[in-house]
Image (tube, helix red, strand yellow):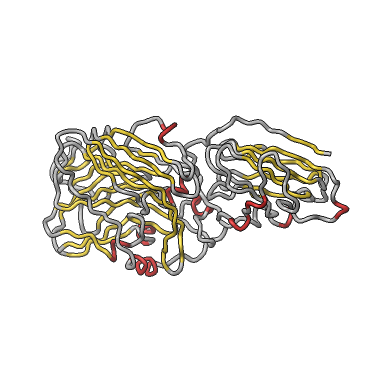
Amino acid sequence: MVEKQKVTVAQGASAVLGIVIVAVLALAAALISPSLVSGTGSEPAAGSGSAPASSASSATGQTTEVTVTVDGMRFVPGTIEVPAGNNLVVNFENTGDQRHDLVFANGVATEALAPGASARLDVGVITSNLDGWCSLPGHRQMGMVLEVVATGSESETTDQMGMGHEGMDHSATASAMPTMADLMDEATKHDPYPARVEPLPPADGPQTREYTFEVVESEEDLGAGIVRPLWTFNGTGPGPILHGRVGDEFVITLVNNGTMGHSIDFHAGEIAPDEVMRTIEPGESLEYRFTAGRSGIWMYHCGTMPMTLHIANGMFGAVIIEPDGLEPVDQSYVLIQSEYYQDEAGNTAADKLNTMIPDVAMFNGRAFQYDVHPLTAKVGDRVRFWVLDVGPNSPLAFHIVGTQFDTVWSEGHYSVHHGQSTDGLTKGVTGAQVLPLQAAQGGFVELVAPEPGHYAIVNHIMTLAEKGAHGILQVE
């Protein structure tokens, strides 16, 4: 006898944008075997996709068949009740807008299914409660979990195979992270991210600026044998720094060469998100056009959920749109702060992301890189720093030890310009010691170093400076 449950949900429902929950689960590739999955509507292959058999006396010989769909970042239904001893068959239909899989704690799993795809699983004889989840990075922590409840069993709270929420959670305990010395030593092995901002050439009017952004998923050494996942636009985190003026049109072709869905969101444009910011599958591409209507240093980032995971793993960058009449300077640099969280399995850590206490903080994607590769200027040079905080969580109090900023521009306006307040009230020479920024905020500061020396560039939230948001301005 086959008992069937069918749940209907809205096709293609999307996750609510702006949820600030982050984490990641290891992909558990060893659990995901195509041999466990058969085509839609076909019966499972004999001996595949089944849980380890329980004793013959516990099996009823009956089957419970259930359809599971996706609504945003959750499975529907979230709980499946199965009479103890029944065999469970799950028809999994990915009605979401990005790839998902379905993994059970007894080892039965689907492949990662593209939107619209489906698979049929023989989960096996259910004798006690059993957990299921999506194993794609961060999806489980976003709420993509379900529970199989064995009704009438001796204990409806015992997880089958002894592997429930705790047994398969790879994001619980943090390993020892590299020390400051380890991070600096690793930075010596790599060329620094190019921080210099070159002057824009003269232009008679608005320009069209075209770029191709290719999604690249890889790994990166942090030091002391610790490796982090690195997801990027064009192979670096940050991605390319775009530079233009108000009125310029930007045309970006995004190509997803990764293994999962990705997207892109440019804060520098004003445009409906529905099409250009949609998640695209591996092998797909899209064109994103926007016209820069306002000056600033604007963040761009992957907007695929969980957004914080994609940002923490390197999918961010900056677009510099110069204010009208911006004066030339002798040296110009861009510094983008981000932070990273890691668990013992080498993945972004769920618990740490939720507590917002990072392991590593960085300028331009690598801790302490501008300590071992200092930025340079000469005495008397006017130096401009474009600064952006991409987070995903931590604030930035940008400060350069031994200097004061005589010009501060942030979020659309000057507060100090060449040593004079812009409020019309403050008299005499003034300045600023920090540029304070929350996540996604940006601006620029200017200074003139009075004498030769090594001026430390820091996030004056000092725990973050000591975790890597630190560098050197070497003045000769």
What residue is drawn where x is 66% and y is 31%?
8
Quarter of the figure with the N terminus:
top right
Taking 42 as reference, is 336 left or right?
left
Closer to the camera in the image, 185 or 207: 207
Residue 327, image x, y percentages:
14, 43
What residue is drawn where x is 23% and y is 42%?
409
Quarter occupied by residue 168: bottom right
Closer to the camera in the image, 398 or 27: 27
Closer to the camera in the image, 453 or 155: 155
What residue is drawn where x is 20% and y is 49%?
198
Taking 255 as reference, is 55 left or right?
right
Residue 393 in view (yes/no):
no
Taking 288 as reference, is 261 left or right?
right
Does 196 sit above or below residue 227?
above
Residue 453, image x, y percentages:
18, 65
Residue 34, image x, y percentages:
63, 51
Residue 158, image x, y percentages:
75, 52
Quarter occupied by residue 223: bottom left
Number of dots carrying numbers: 0
Does 185 sit above or below residue 6?
below
Q: Residue furthest right?
A: 57
Quarter of the figure with the C terminus:
bottom left
Residue 259 in view (yes/no):
yes
